[in-house]
Image (tube, rainbow, N blue to C red):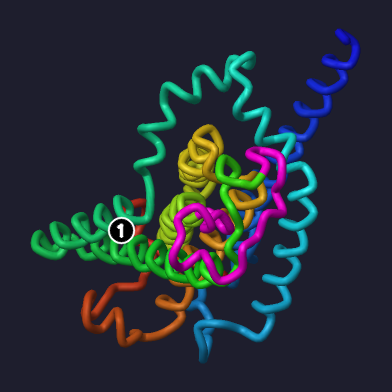
């Protein structure tokens, strides 16, 4: 019995490491796309994209969906790993998860808009620019997540027909009316990564050399809301991963789209005429995705 327990723990820890590696890769890849740009391209204005979504987005999205499906194989094991109080990280996580779970689409959107309003009133145009794009990214990621969750109807771990065991409990079209069937993707995760990605993208535009100094803490914090939901039994690991990818996409794309145009209709209304030149580290930034 003791040997079997050791093997099971080893398998769970191995699965957890794989999850962290995948999430970290999703975070780092977005920052790497911008950081790896040639210096010549950094000195030029970003190319203008005619539409917000590109033709490649569907194919890339399908690839990440397949990756989420592959990760789902380990969902049940990881769910137990985040519920077993024999592990120190579970005991610690349960003490702080009620705080981090409040870092969500509502608080991030409202917080961004509050900073935007104050910055506009005080003439801090770069700060207003960044704060508005954070809110815009979080909102877009949240709406997209809801449009996926409603029809898919994936049941949350604690509410599955076999709690924390059946990660493939789907009740199609029930996600719109039932909270228990809104697991995939995690809006907490998509919101956190959308906010982090918008901030990192803006920093990269204004001060490329500072990108990594901002990206590491920003993405580390972005992981915490999604992980808190795993401790609470609200999401599977694949929900968190899918939300992270979706949020990263919107954070970078919103900023890129804004700065690849002289002005967009949304920016014209809320930001007016904006200065898109590079200026050291003050908090008004952008990027090319």
Residue 127, picture quadrant: bottom left
Seen in the picture, residue 172 relative to 30 is either above or below; the reply is: below
Task: Give the residue drawn at x 59%, y 17%.
Answer: 85
Q: Position of residue 289 (x, y in %)?
A: 57, 70
Farthest residue, direction bottom: 50
Q: Report the predominant secondary structure element of the magenta stretch.
A: loop
Of residues 12 and 55, the one nearer the viewer is 12
Q: Is residue 259 left or right of residue 109?
A: right
Seen in the picture, residue 227 relative to 252 is either above or below; the reply is: above
Query: For the residue labelled by badge 1, is the local secondary structure a helix, a strand or a loop?
Result: helix
Farthest residue, direction left: 121
Q: Is residue 41 magenta?
A: no
Task: Give the residue drawn at x 49%, y 36%.
Answer: 228
Query: What are the residue bounds of the magenta stretch?
Result: 162-186
Residue 277, picture quadrant: bottom left
Q: Is residue 2 left or right of residue 169?
A: right
Q: Position of residue 174 (x, y in %)?
A: 53, 66
Q: Position of residue 182 (x, y in %)?
A: 51, 58
Q: Which residue is mark 1?
A: 109
């Amino acid at each position: 019995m003791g040997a079997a327990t050791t093997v099971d723990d080893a398998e769970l820890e191995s699965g957890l490491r794989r999850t962290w590696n995948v999430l970290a890769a999703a975070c780092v890849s977005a920052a790497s796309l911008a950081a790896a740009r040639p210096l010549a391209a950094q000195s030029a204005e970003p190319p203008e994209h005619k539409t917000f979504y590109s033709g490649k987005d569907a194919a890339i999205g399908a690839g990440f969906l397949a990756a989420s499906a592959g990760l789902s194989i380990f969902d049940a094991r990881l769910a137990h790993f985040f519920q077993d109080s024999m592990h120190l990280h579970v005991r610690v996580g349960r003490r702080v998860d009620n705080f981090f779970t409040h870092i969500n689409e509502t608080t991030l959107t409202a917080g961004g808009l509050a900073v935007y309003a104050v910055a506009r009133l005080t003439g801090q145009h770069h700060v207003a620019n960044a704060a508005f794009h954070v809110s815009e990214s979080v909102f877009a990621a949240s709406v997209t997540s809801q449009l996926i969750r409603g029809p898919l109807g994936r049941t949350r771990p604690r509410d599955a027909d076999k709690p924390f065991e059946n990660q493939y409990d789907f009740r199609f079209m029930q996600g719109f009316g039932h909270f228990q069937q809104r697991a995939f993707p995690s809006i907490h995760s998509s919101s956190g990564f959308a906010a982090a990605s918008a901030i990192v993208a803006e920093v990269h535009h204004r001060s490329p050399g500072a990108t990594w100094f901002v990206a590491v803490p920003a993405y580390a914090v972005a992981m915490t809301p999604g992980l808190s939901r795993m401790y609470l039994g609200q999401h599977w690991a694949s929900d968190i991963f899918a939300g992270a990818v979706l949020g990263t996409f919107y954070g970078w794309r919103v900023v890129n789209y804004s700065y690849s145009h002289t002005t967009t209709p949304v920016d014209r209304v809320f930001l007016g005429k904006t200065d898109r030149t590079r200026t050291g580290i003050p908090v008004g930034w952008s990027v090319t995705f």
